[in-house]
Image (cartoon, rainbow, N blue to C red):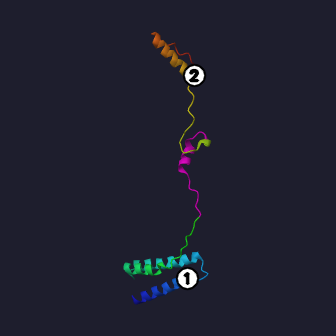
Amino acid sequence: MRDVEQVIAGLKSETIREITKENARPEAQLAWYWTYIGSLDMAQQLGLINDARRQALYREVEQFKPAYEVKVPQEVKPNHLAAAEMSVEGNYNQIDGIINNEAPKPPSVLDNLRQCQEEAGKSQGGAAPPNRDPER
């Protein structure tokens, strides 16, 4: 165990030295910090140190943790709703989040006429005129 503590002390001093260098790049500082943390995790997993010792070593170098975040450019996430809508939408200029929102069809004049004729025939007690539309 004594050798393990010497190795950890050497790793800690080297990490602190590299993090606190005057011209160190933030990416390098983060790499040194997280390499040290990963080494402590590995030592604990191998049974070389216990969890309490690992936590104590974390706290000792916490003050040297670089205050730098690596900013990854965000990619445009695919819009699954728009993709689903494009597959069923008849008109691509209406991609708005509502699936198949075509304009309602105007009522058929012939259907309206037949309905009026049926109502008129019922109110007079007679039968409605026969359907003469060959398309229907």
User: Which quadrant of the figure contains the C terminus?
Assistant: top right
User: Element type at marker 1?
Assistant: loop
Q: Residue at x 46, y 79 (%)?
A: 39
* Residue that mark 1 sits on: 20
- Separation (CA) of disc 2 from disc 1: 84 Å
User: Which quadrant of the figure contains the N terminus?
Assistant: bottom left
**Residue 85 part of the magenta-drawn span:** yes
Identified by mark 2, the residue type is Val
Q: Residue at x 62, y 42 (%)?
A: 93
The reply to whether the C-beta atoms of the residues labelled 2 and 1 are less than 8 Å apart is: no
Q: Evaluate whether residue 31 shows in this view.
A: yes
Q: Looking at the picture, how far across and down is residue 119, in whole percent?
A: 48, 16
Question: Magenta segment range?
Answer: 73-91
Identified by mark 1, the residue type is Thr
Q: Looking at the picture, how far across and down is residue 70, in whole percent?
A: 56, 69
For label 1, the crowd category at 10 Å Cα-Cα, with few meaning under 14, some 14 to 19 and many 20 or more, is some
Q: Residue at x 53, y 50 (%)?
A: 80
* Residue that mark 2 sits on: 109
Q: Determine which quarter of the picture holds residue 133.
A: top right
User: Element type at marker 2?
Assistant: helix
Q: Looking at the picture, how far across and down is residue 33, in whole percent?
A: 51, 78
Of residue 46 and residue 71, the one placed in the foreground of this image is 71
Q: Evaluate whether residue 136 shows in this view.
A: no
